């Protein structure tokens, strides 16, 4: 028999990127309603792109996010090059992977230390946590600083990089610039190993979930820029087939679309998905530390995503140092191309998960259509599903603790709400005098 109806209302979620709220209605026996309410205004980036030159897409889409601009640049670059049948040289491809390493380090350490870790230690924010754990916060900032240096060296600046272009880079770094980063990255890699061991000892709520994980899978490397789209339940498709299998839906309570797997529903992208589907492709050092921590796939507890993020930071340093040690400057910083009427798509692995772009351009190279599916759009339905599954296990807690646990569960996903708000279709109608 149902008991008294109760609600959990969080008007403004804290320590997430962007603006959102939470509403849950439940009673003593079951959860009746869960709504992750994203109310941030739509940002119209797909509309902004129409009519712009194809070469502008990487710089425009980078402004979608100040935390993961490289991810938007990479997906836009690959989609345009897919449209124009342009294949960059292995040297340029490797430089893009190095840039992505810097972004993973920046983004993951920001989330781990400033947004997520205070949850596990009972602090309202990182400043309060730093009073009792100054060494952890200092190490995290040193690690992030190294990631900033890597993005700045390749991208021209650490936020919204300006050195990438369709076909490659405006300029390639010199060998001495690479050498100048080696010591800083090596020191930060050691600190990242310590952070992994620290994170693995945090107290994790018991919240094992049955989730379908989706990520890129590349047979030769841990996925960043390229690969097939695979899932833990057997999906295995090329990126070109993404829109045949994934559909976006509008829901009344969110200004962001919900993405679903056709005929299957919610799924998860991000660090847990990458880790569970690509563990053998992590570097020997990362697998050694994962062994030491007894942390193996499958990991089905979203609260443990903080450990995976730390392991991915360690991997990014390992991969960056490998690339720097083998660096050969490219003969040309970019490959030139000419526009043509075409369409192309690409998916890369943003820190928060799979990021899909598709563009159509006309014979002059002007963008006529753009579609962008951000990781948070893909995870929203799973976040609500997670809360619905989790609550019955913790209903014995006082309401204030239960509300806090729900907020913590949302932060497991590192939602970038601003990135996800793209749902409105803009229709322009011209009257007979040509005015809109």
Image: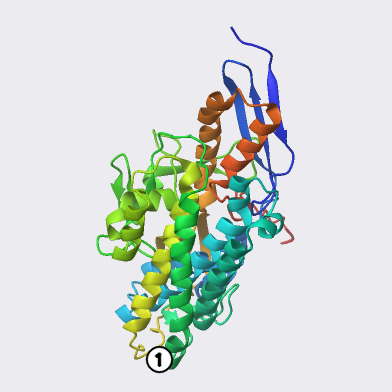
> Which quadrant, please, contains the N terminus?
top right
Where's residue 313, x and y in %? Answer: 45, 63
Mark 1 element type: helix
Query: What is the residue that sits farthest to the front in this orientation?
Result: 132
Where's residue 395, x and y in %? Answer: 60, 23
Above or below — where is 100 with respect to 358?
Answer: below
210 on left or right of 150: left
- Residue 90 seen anywhere in this rendered image of the structure: yes
- Residue 356 seen anywhere in this rendered image of the structure: no
Q: Say which residue appears at 61% left-offset and 36% top-offset.
A: 406
Residue 52 position by quadrant: bottom right
Above or below — where is 181 with respect to 203?
Answer: below
147 on left or right of 324: right
The residue that disc 1 covers is: 175
Above or below — where is 179 with respect to 88?
Answer: below
Judging depth in this view, the residue of 350 and 235 nearest the camera is: 350
How many badges with numbers are in the image?
A: 1
Judging depth in this view, the residue of 417 and 192 nearest the camera is: 192
Q: Say which residue appears at 64% left-offset and 54% top-offset.
A: 17
Where's residue 120, x and y in %? Answer: 58, 46
Q: Say which residue appears at 59% left-offset and 64% top-offset.
A: 135
Q: Residues within 10 Å of mark 1 (few under 14, many from 20)?
A: few
Colour option used = rainbow
Residue 56 position by quadrant: bottom right
Where's residue 76, x and y in %? Answer: 47, 67
């Amino acid at each position: 028999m149902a008991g008294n109806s109760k609600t959990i209302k969080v008007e403004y979620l804290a320590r997430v990127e962007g603006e959102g709220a939470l509403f849950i209605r439940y009673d003593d026996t079951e959860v009746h309603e869960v709504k992750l309410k994203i109310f941030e205004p739509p940002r119209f980036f797909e509309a902004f792109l129409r009519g712009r030159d194809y070469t502008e897409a990487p710089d425009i889409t980078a402004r979608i996010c100040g935390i993961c601009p490289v991810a938007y640049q990479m997906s836009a670059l690959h989609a345009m090059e897919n449209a124009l049948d342009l294949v960059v040289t292995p040297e340029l491809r490797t430089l893009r992977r190095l840039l992505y390493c810097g972004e993973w380090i920046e983004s993951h350490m920001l989330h781990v230390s400033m947004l997520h870790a205070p949850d596990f230690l009972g602090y309202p924010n990182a400043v309060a946590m730093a009073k009792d754990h100054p060494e952890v916060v200092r190490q995290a900032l040193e690690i992030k600083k190294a990631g900033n240096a890597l993005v700045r060296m390749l991208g021209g600046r650490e936020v919204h990089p300006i050195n990438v272009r369709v076909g490659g880079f405006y300029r390639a770094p010199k060998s001495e610039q690479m050498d100048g980063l080696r010591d800083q990255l090596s020191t930060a890699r050691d600190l990242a190993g310590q952070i992994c061991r620290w994170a693995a000892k945090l107290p994790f709520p018991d919240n094992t979930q049955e989730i379908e994980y989706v990520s890129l899978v590349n047979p030769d490397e841990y996925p960043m820029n390229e690969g097939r789209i695979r899932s833990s339940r057997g999906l295995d498709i090329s990126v070109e087939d993404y829109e045949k299998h994934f559909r976006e839906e509008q829901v009344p309570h969110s200004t962001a679309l919900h993405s679903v797997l056709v005929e299957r529903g919610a799924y998860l992208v991000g660090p847990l998905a990458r880790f569970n589907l690509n563990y053998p492709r992590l570097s020997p050092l990362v697998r050694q530390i994962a062994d030491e921590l007894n942390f193996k796939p499958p990991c089905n507890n979203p609260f443990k995503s903080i450990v995976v993020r730390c392991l991915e930071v360690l991997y990014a340093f390992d991969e960056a140092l490998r690339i720097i040690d083998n660096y050969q400057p490219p003969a040309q910083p970019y490959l030139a191309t000419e526009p043509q009427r075409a369409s192309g798509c690409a998916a890369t692995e943003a820190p928060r998960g799979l990021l899909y772009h598709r563009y159509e351009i006309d014979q002059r190279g002007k963008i006529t259509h753009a579609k962008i599916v951000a990781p948070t759009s893909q995870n929203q339905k799973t976040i609500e599903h997670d809360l619905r599954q989790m609550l019955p296990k913790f209903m014995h807690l006082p309401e204030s603790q239960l509300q806090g646990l729900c907020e913590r569960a949302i932060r497991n996903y590192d939602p970038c709400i601003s990135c996800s708000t793209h749902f409105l279709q803009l229709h322009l109608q011209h009257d007979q005098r040509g005015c809109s």
